[in-house]
Image: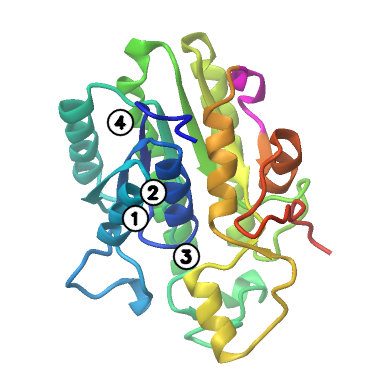
Amino acid sequence: MSTLKGKVAVVTGASRGGGRGIALALGEAGATVYVTGRSTKNQATTDNLPGTIDETAESVTLRGGVGIPVRCDHTIDAEVEALFTKVKTEQGHLDLLVNNAWGGYENYYGTNFEDGVAFDAPFWEHSLQRWQTMFNAGVRAQLLTTRFAIPLMLPQNQGLIVCTTAWDRNKYLGNLYYDLAKNAVNRMAFGMARELEKYNIAAIALAPGFMRTERVMAAYNLQPFDLSNSESPEYIGRAIVALASDPDIMSKSGQVLAVGNLAWDYGFADIDGNQPPAFKIE
């Protein structure tokens, strides 16, 4: 269904994982999607994982949309500014921004980082570099990207900003740096919603469940684990298509939403026809 035909979207961190799944779902809905990330064809990819912005953009087009790859490091101000200058020049406006680029997972394999520290180890055992990466390539990158995106939404007095996050009813996420960073993203979406309300621009934090990303599957291939409660990266993409198609989206602005709950609310399913419930921490 071309429910988003004519709409222009930017999806950050879309070489692989959730970003790729989001871009593909938007393409299937007919949108023009600017696919950003650092992994490009003919070059080494992040942690040598499969997936590039070029491949994602090609798949977006094959799905029925228009995929446009733009290499962008979202920690570098000038590159982010250049991205939105390109969007403005080529499209004149922006309807949807999905802040998905994130740092902090680098060199994490199976259950440990390469230095042998487990993700859920006490905070004093983790390198402060994890904090730096999560807040610089995560929280700041999302704020920076939104800052340059907003001027393309203001003239049309409408738009949607989605910040991907991790969340389960405000439960602790098991890693202090990660918990602080993700809660900062949630609060950022809330604050953005307050300031953008008068411009009819919605801001939402959206939490997927346990996604079968390339990184997760690489870990699974090293040591199999239970995937029965997992979901495809396109499940969150279908949630975003539903949100972007909702004429009453402003009623959800400022909230932290879960993909599994939205599946029930909007009536969409994952690619296998199932509706995985919202992720819950035991």
Region of the chain picked out in magenta, as a range: 248-255
Residue for badge 1: 59
Whether residue 27 is visible, yes or no, is: yes
The kind of secondary structure element at disc 1 is helix
Q: Please state which of residues 269 and 190 is positioned toward the viewer in this rendering.
A: 269
Q: Please state which of residues 206 and 112 is positioned toward the viewer in this rendering.
A: 206
Q: Do the residues labelled 2 and 1 touch (CB within 8 Å)?
A: yes
Callout 2 amino acid: Arg
- Which numbered disc, 3 or 4, marks the residue that appears first in the sequence? 3
The kind of secondary structure element at disc 2 is loop
What is the spatial separation of the Cα atoms under label 3 and label 4, in whole angstroms? 23 Å
Residue for badge 2: 63
Q: Residue 148 carries which label?
A: 4
Instruction: Please indicate whether residue 92 sits to the left or right of residue 200 in the image.
Output: left
The 10 Å Cα crowd at callout 4, few under 14, some 14 to 19, many 20 or more, is some
What is the spatial separation of the Cα atoms under label 4 and label 1, in whole angstroms? 26 Å
